[in-house]
Amino acid sequence: MEAFRHEALQDVGSTNTECLERARAGDPGNLWITATRQTSGRGRRGRVWTSEPGNLYASLLLINPAPMDRIASLPLAVAVGLQAAVSAVMPRDAEPVEVKWPNDILIGRKKTCGILIEGEGLPDGRHALVIGIGINIRHKPETAPYAVTRLEEHGCFITADELFAHLFREMAVVIKIWDEGRGISDITRRWLNVACGVGEKITVNLPDRSLTGRFDGIAADGLLMLNLGGGQIVPIAAGDVFFERTE
Ligand code: BTN
C-alpha cells in the first residue's frame, strides 16, 4: 500500500467532489483532502451536510481499492477507523463512542459523524472510490431527522486539524487490516465490539416500508440481520435504523 498524502484546502464545494475531480485528472489515489468549510457538503440520501468552519470535513480517494466482490465490507472498516479516531480524543469519562449500522458514529446514542462513500468508473478503466467523513466538533445541524450532537458537548475541545491527525493514522491502520477485503472477519469482529444496539429491538426504515425486529448482528458481507421472530431473519443491505430506547 502506497503512503497516504494530504492536501488541506480552505473553502470548497465538497471534499468528495474535489477527490473525484483529482481521480478524473489521473491522481493515483491514497489522497486525503480536507477543507475548513464546504459550500455544497453532501450527506447520505441526497441530504445537505451543513459545513461551517470548526468541524472536520475530510475525504479519502482510493483507486481500485479491492475487487468488486470484496468492496461491501469497506464501509464497516471505515466506521471502525473513525470510531477509533474519535474515541482517542474523548475525555475518559465521556459517554461511549459507538457505531450505528452501517457507519454512523454516535456519542451517547446521538449522531456526531457521518460517512458518505461515492464511487465512479474512470474513462481509463480504473475505479475511483471516495470516503467522505464529516465530524461535528463545534457545530451540529439545527434540524435533523435523528438525534445529533457534537464533540464539544461531551467535553472534547479539539481543532479539526488535531482530530484529522488521529483520523489519518487510524484509517491507515484499519485499511491495512481490511487488506482489500481479505481482512473482513477481523473487521467484522472489531465492528461488533463497538456497535450500538446489537440484540435490541430496532426499526429499519426502507424506501418502501418499515420493519421492526431484533438486531441480530451483521453477516460476513456487512448486511444487517433483522430477526422478525418465528425463525424469520431478514438481511438488510441499506436503510435507516432507529433504536427503541432513545428514538
Ligand atoms: C451522512 O449523511 O451521514 C454522511 C455525511 C458525510 C459528510 C462528509 S463531509 C466531507 C465529505 N464531503 C461531503 O460533501 N460529504 C462528506
Image (spheres, grey):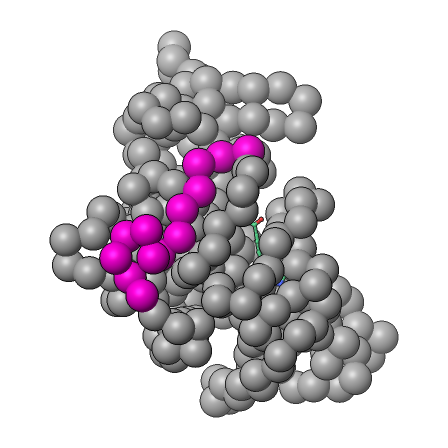
Is residue 162 positioned above or below 140 on the image? Answer: below
Question: Closer to the camera, 95 or 198?
Answer: 95
- Image quarter for residue 208? top right
* Residue 126, percent from left and from top: 73, 75
Q: Is residue 114 visible?
A: yes
Give the magenta-colored segment's residue range: 145-157
The quarter of the picture showing ligand 1: bottom right
In magenta segment, residue 96 = no
Magenta stretch: dominant secondary structure: loop
Question: Closer to the camera, 93 or 64?
Answer: 93
Question: Closer to the camera, 199 or 5?
Answer: 5
- Image quarter for residue 229? top left
Left/right placement of residue 70 relative to residue 130 reads left
Question: Closer to the camera, 208 or 183?
Answer: 208
Left/right placement of residue 203 relative to residue 144 reads left
* Residue 124, percent from left and from top: 82, 79
In magenta segment, residue 150 = yes
Q: Which residue is drawn at 51% across and 27% down?
A: 204
Q: Which residue is drawn at 43% across and 78% down?
A: 161
Q: Residue at x 79, y 84 (%)?
A: 25
